[in-house]
Image (tube, rainbow, N blue to C red):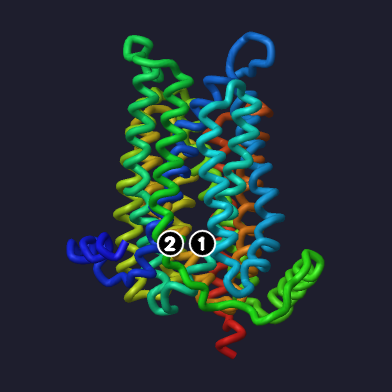
Amino acid sequence: MKKLFKWLNGTRIFRGLTPEEFSWVLYDVGNSAFTMLACSLIPIWFKDLAIGTGPGKLSGDQATAYYSLSISLITIVIALLGPVLGALADHKETKKIFFTTTVAAGVVGCILNGFAWSWVVFLVIYVLTKILYHSSLTFYDSMLNDVTTDERMDEVSSYGYAWGYIGSCIPFIIAMIAYVLSGGLSENLMLFSPFVGRVIGFAVTAVWWLLVTLPLITHYKQKNYVETERTTVGSVFKKIFATLKKIVTKDRKVMFFLIAFFLYIDGVGTIIDNCINIGTDLGLPTVGQVVFLLATQVVAWVGSLVFAKLSKKYDTVPLILICIAGYFAVCLYALTLKTLLHFGILAFGVGCFQGSIQSLSRSYYSKIIPPENSGEYFGIYDIFSKGASFLGSAVIAWVKLAGGTINIAVASLAIFFALGFVFLILSGKQKSLAER
C-alpha cells in the first residue's frame, strides 16, 4: 500500500493526503461500488425476477412499492442497530473488529445475491447485505476523527466521496457489460443467461469492495476511545439514552444539526435509492438511464472536489446550505420530467451536490462531537440519517400505491429540504459544548 500511495502522491491525484487519510479515502472507493450497483442494476434485476403474469409474480407498480418498502425496512433496522454498534465500538481496539466483520459479511452477502432464484430470495439477501453495508459505514464514518485533524476533515471527507464516485465506475462498467451480454438490452446480444450476468455483476462488485478495503483494515489504528470496563447491551442502551438527553438539554448545536440532517438527507437518500425506478416508471430506455447515471458519477466527482477546495476558504454550514438549496430546486424540477433529456438534466443537478452534501455533513458532525465517543455519536447520526430515508421511501411507495406519479412523489420531498435549511441555520448559530 505504501508503494501505491507513493506513486499516486507523485501523480498529484492524492497529493497532500497522509497514508492514513489515503487508506480511509479508499474505503469510499470500495463501498461506492455496491452503492452504484444498488442505484442501477439491482432494481432492474429485481424487477426482471418479480414482474410477470405467472404465480407469485408482481405488476410493475407492485414491484416498485415492494422495493421501496424493503429500503424502508433496511433503514429502520440500521436506525436501531447503529447506536448500539457504535457505542460498543468506542472501546479500545474494537472499532476495527466490528468494521472488518461487517465488511466481510457484506461481501459474502453481495456474492450470494447473484445466485438468488426468486424475487423473494433476492430481496431478502439484498436487505441483509445492505444492513451489513450500512453498519460498516457507521464504523467507517467514526474513523474520520482517528485518521485526520479537525482542520482537514472537510477536505478529507470530500475526497472520500469524490474518488468513490469515480472508483465505483470501474466494477460497474464490468457489471454493465455482463448485463448487456446476458440479454439485458436485447436478446440478439445474449452470450450467456441473465442468471450468469447477475452472478458476474455481484461477484465483481464484491471483490472490488473487499480489495480496496484491505489498506484501511491493515493500517487503521484507533486513537480515540473511552476508558471503561466491558459493557453489556443494557449499559450501552443506558449510555445512549444519557447521551441523547445531553444532546437535547445541553448541546443545541448538535441537536439542531441532527434535526436538519434528518430532514434534508431524506431527499438525498430517497433520490439515490430510487433513481432507476424514476426512469423506469417514466418508460425511459434503460441504456440511456445508465449512461446518465455514469455521467452523474463524473459530475459528482467534480462537484465534491470543488467543494473540498471551497471548504478551505469558507465555513462548512454555508456550503451545506448551498447544497440544500440545489436539491430543493432539483425536487421541484422533477414535476417537469417526461423525456430522457429531462432525466439527464435532473441527474446533472443531483450530481452537482450529491457527494458534497453528504461529505460536508459527515465532517461538520465530526467536528462538533466528542472524538472519544465518535462511534456512539455516529450511531445516533445513523438514526437520523436512516430514519429520514425511511420516510422518503415510504412517500414514494404511498404515492405509487395511491395511483400518483413518480413526478409528484419526488417533488413532495422539497418540503424536507426547506425545513432542513432552516434548522441548519439554527445549528450554525449555536456553540458546541467544547466552545463554551
Which residue type does callout 2 highlight? Leu
Q: Is residue 193 visible?
A: yes
Towards the viewer: 282 or 243 = 243
Above or below, 288 relative to 365:
above
Q: Could you say which quadrant of the image residue 242 lies in? A: bottom right
Towards the viewer: 377 or 213 = 213
Is 192 on the left or on the right of 140, as rendered?
A: left
Q: Which of the labelled discs sits on residue 248, or is there none? A: none
Q: Residue at x 61, y 21 (%)?
A: 118
Q: Position of residue 430 (x, y in %)?
A: 58, 80
Q: Quadrant of the N terminus?
A: bottom left
Which residue type does callout 1 highlight? Tyr
Q: Which of the labelled discs sits on residue 140, or is there none? A: 1
Q: Could you say which quadrant of the image residue 246 lies in? A: bottom right
Do the CB atoms of the residues marked 1 and 2 lie less than 8 Å apart?
Answer: yes
Q: Position of residue 39 (x, y in %)?
A: 47, 38
Q: Residue at x 62, y 52 (%)?
A: 386
The residue at which mark 2 appears reads as 216
